[in-house]
């Protein structure tokens, strides 16, 4: 995979940087690695249509276009691992230790600091193009009833959005330059996976239960031990209970 960030598009306001990026791809106006960032997202989205609510101008919302992915659908979680561990690397630069809450939210001390939404264009059984959407809390200091935090709350420093973006791009490109393999990314992802190998409470279609996260399958399903059996869960099929 080639590096990202050679072209950066800055927008004042947009419904969703992922939607905007998808439209540019259809018109043939984007090259691989382009980054689209917005001061304000009026309809930012998370996984399964969940809203991503941020204050305009205080946080970083952007999308990355990855072309010629040529990744098997069965191994689609590679991209999630790559982005997640790149965010872990990025936050470590600010001495902020973060954990990954499956599948791709980043938390600091049980408070969300970043989220990821990856949307793929599939041809046959292979992913050809991907849009990686990222929301990162930067300068916001109040989140109402949301359990969230930001770079400012963790460091006490207000930061330029450009500086934060370039720092993340560097962390992402470092991972690419190292030629990340599935096994290396899996090991690093698991190292920071919240509740891995810890007896915890969950809820699925059959009700609440005690189980243990064993890992994540290549297609992104969560591997959970339940009553001595290993089960696989897709997004929204299982809920963490605090």
Image (spheres, grey):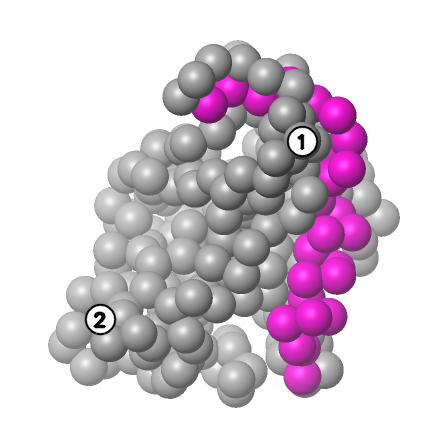
Q: Would you say residue 59 sits in the magenta stretch?
A: no
Give above or below for 76 relative to 240.
below
Q: Would you say residue 180 sits in the magenta stretch?
A: yes
Q: Residue furthest front?
A: 228
Secondary structure of the residue carrying numbered label 2: helix
Q: Residue furthest right?
A: 95
Specify whether 80 is left or right of 85: left
> Residue 154's x, y, as percent?
76, 35
Q: Residue at x 24, y 76 (%)?
A: 124
- The residue indicated by pointer 1 is 228
Q: Earlier in the sequence, mark 2 or mark 1?
A: 2
Residue 45 sits in quarter: top left
Secondary structure of the residue carrying numbered label 1: loop
Q: Residue at x 72, y 52 (%)?
A: 190
Question: What is the span of residues highlighted in magenta in the rendered image?
Answer: 179-204
Q: Residue at x 52, y 84 (%)?
A: 1
> Residue 49's x, y, as percent?
30, 37
Q: Which mark is residue 18?
A: none
Q: CA distance from mark 2 to mark 1?
A: 49 Å
Give above or below for 150 relative to 215.
above
Specify whether 132 is left or right of 157: left
- The residue indicated by pointer 2 is 24
Q: Residue at x 67, y 31 (%)?
A: 228
Residue 52 sits in quarter: top left
Residue nearest the observer in this picture, 239 or 19: 239
Q: Which is closer to the viewer, label 2 or label 1?
A: 1
> Residue 105's x, y, as percent?
56, 41
Label 1 neighbour load within 10 Å: few <14, some 14-19, many 20+: few
Specify whether 185 is left or right of 30: right
> Residue 126's x, y, as percent?
34, 76
Residue nearest the observer in this picture, 178 or 218: 218
Give the quadrant of the C terminus.
Answer: top right
């Amino acid at each position: 995979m080639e590096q990202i960030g050679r072209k950066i598009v800055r927008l004042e306001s947009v419904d969703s940087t992922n939607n905007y990026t998808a439209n540019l791809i259809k018109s043939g106006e984007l090259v691989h690695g382009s980054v689209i960032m917005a001061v304000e997202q009026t309809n930012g989205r998370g996984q399964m249509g969940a809203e991503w609510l941020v204050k305009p101008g205080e946080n970083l919302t952007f999308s990355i276009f990855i072309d010629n992915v040529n990744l098997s659908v069965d191994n689609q979680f590679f991209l999630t691992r790559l982005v997640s561990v790149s965010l872990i690397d990025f936050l470590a630069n600010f001495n902020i230790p973060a954990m990954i809450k499956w599948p791709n939210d980043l938390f600091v001390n049980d408070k969300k600091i970043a989220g990821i939404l990856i949307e793929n264009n599939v041809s046959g059984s292979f992913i050809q193009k991907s849009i990686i959407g990222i929301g990162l809390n930067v300068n916001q200091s109040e989140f109402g009833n949301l359990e969230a935090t930001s770079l400012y709350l963790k460091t006490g420093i207000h930061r330029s959005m450009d500086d934060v973006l370039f720092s993340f791009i560097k962390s992402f490109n470092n991972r690419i330059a190292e030629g990340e393999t599935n096994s290396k990314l899996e090991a690093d992802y698991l190292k920071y996976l919240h509740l891995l190998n810890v007896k915890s409470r969950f809820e699925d279609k059959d009700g609440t239960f005690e189980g243990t996260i064993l890992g994540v399958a290549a297609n992104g399903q969560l591997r959970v031990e339940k009553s001595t059996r290993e089960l696989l869960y897709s997004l929204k099929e299982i809920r963490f209970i605090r």
